[in-house]
Amino acid sequence: MVAPTGEQFTIAADGYEAVVVEGGGIRSLTHRGVEVLRGYPADERPAGGRGQVLVPWVNRVRDGAYAFDGQDLQLAISEPKTGNAIHGLVRWCSWRPLEVADDRVRLGYRLMAQTGYPWTLDVTADYAVAGGGLTITLTATNLAHSPAPFAAGMHPYLAVGAGRVDDVTLTVPAETRQLVDERSLPVGTAPVSWDHDFRTGRLIGSLELDDAYTDLIRGGDGLAVVRVEGQSSAVEMWLDDSFAWVQVFTGDTLERGARESLAVEPMTSPADAFNSGTDLVELEPGSTWSGRFGIRRA
């Protein structure tokens, strides 16, 4: 028998242990037995995008339709309830191990040109644990003969202990929030208002979040740090400057585990960037994009 996410790769170092899956994502992360990521059992498939890689777009493409370089293109509608294409093309694929060590695993997947996305990409996801936590490096190389529209992200859920996100203090160092309509598609941006301003850290309370933030405030090392602090533990995610956006989701619409963990999603661009062009990467033939972020117990 094969697990729904395929082969399981366990890596460990300095008290951290992570399980990375052939299905292209991370299933669990702990530090000295304390849950850092809220994962899922080995005999289940990930729901709600849990721990999955988002390539070659993040979030949604309006109606699955977009135009690029003189082509009108149509993606499959993978979110029927909104009529959109969601979270890219690599979430349910079999990734191959390129390098496996006790503390690191690097997986690769070749995304073939297809209807709606006629470019071939080589994508890798490198997972490494050390005393500073888990570092994830995503790369993509355009193997096609023409520029390709591209965005990348990931969909981990940060653990908040045994409680609910209502009792979590959230810090998001961002000046701007994206505004969306009833289909979760962007209609504009605005400075963070009092109820969505998490720059100095505040309780989430009953607030329902599925919001993208940008204009991230970075330290001298160029990193932006999101912090989630529960009653018994705290988790931080850092993002390098490849990731200009971060989505925060309180999980209210999940069929199971609603408001029990907080999705914090590093993104290079916001929803519907294939149409708006906002922070969209145009990956030239033969060129490689790379971005890093990390997760640690604080």
Image (cartoon, grey):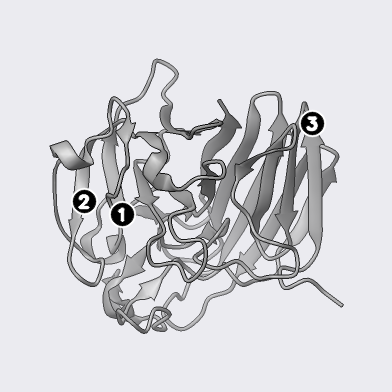
Q: What percent of the width, then of the height, locates residue 172? A: 34, 34
Q: Which residue is mark 1?
A: 270
Q: Quadrant of residue 86?
A: bottom left
Residue at 49% across / 32% down in the picture? 231
Residues 82 and 32: in front is 32
In front of the other: label 1 or label 2?
2
Label 3 neighbour load within 10 Å: few <14, some 14-19, many 20+: some
Classify 124 as above or below 79. above
Asked if disc 3 and disc 2 are in contact, CB closer than 8 Å, the reply is: no
- Left/right of residue 86 with respect to residue 35 in the rendered view: left
Kind of residue at badge 2: Gln
Residues 232 and 176: in front is 232
Residue at 37% across / 48% down in the picture? 248
**Marks 3 and 1, the one that precedes in the sequence:** 3
Q: Quadrant of residue 27?
A: bottom right
Check residue 13 in the rendering and tell me which mark sits there, or answer none: 3
**Marks 3 and 2, the one that precedes in the sequence:** 3
In front of the other: label 3 or label 1?
3
Residue 192 is at least partly visible in this image: no
Q: Please identify the residue farthest to the top as the structure is shown.
A: 220
Classify 170 as above or below 29. above
Q: CA distance from mark 3 to mark 2?
A: 38 Å
Kind of residue at badge 3: Ala
Q: Which residue is mark 2?
A: 178
Q: What percent of the width, then of the height, locates residue 69? A: 30, 69
- Left/right of residue 19 with respect to residue 290 in the rendered view: right
Q: Number of callouts in the render?
A: 3
